[in-house]
Amino acid sequence: MLTSRQVDTVERVSLMLSDVMVIIVTIYRTYGIVKASRAINLRSTISTELLNAGTSILEMHHILLNTC
């Protein structure tokens, strides 16, 4: 049986791992966009790309909430 402290530790570790996974996927997806933009000499910062990705996610979330 797990103690309360062990459950708390497992919970925190799983939350940290999920955050790391989000960061890795974001970097992976953003790298392709940045690489393509540099190929056509379009300068774009990582902040711009993250903002665009976040905006798209929020728009999809909004659409899904309004259709259900």
Image: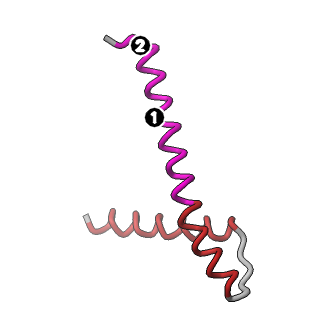
- Tell me which corner region of the image, top left, top right, bottom left or bottom right, holds residue 67: bottom left
**Residue 43: x %, y % from top left:** 74, 80
Question: Which residue type carries mark 2?
Answer: Ser
Residue projecting furthest to the left: 68
**Residue 29: x %, y % from top left:** 53, 66
Question: For the magenta stretch, what is the residue range?
Answer: 2-26
Q: Residue at x 72, y 70 (%)?
A: 45
Q: Residue at x 63, y 70 (%)?
A: 49
| Image quadrant where one finds the N terminus | top left
- Mark closer to the chain start, 1 or 2: 2
Question: Which residue type carries mark 1?
Answer: Ser
Which residue matches tag 2? 4
Q: Is 12 colored magenta in this rendering?
A: yes
Which residue matches tag 1? 14
Above-or-below relation of 39 to 27: below
Is mark 1 in CB contact (under 8 Å) with mark 2?
no
Q: Is 15 colored magenta in this rendering?
A: yes
Q: Residue at x 32, y 67 (%)?
A: 66
**Residue 25: x %, y % from top left:** 51, 58
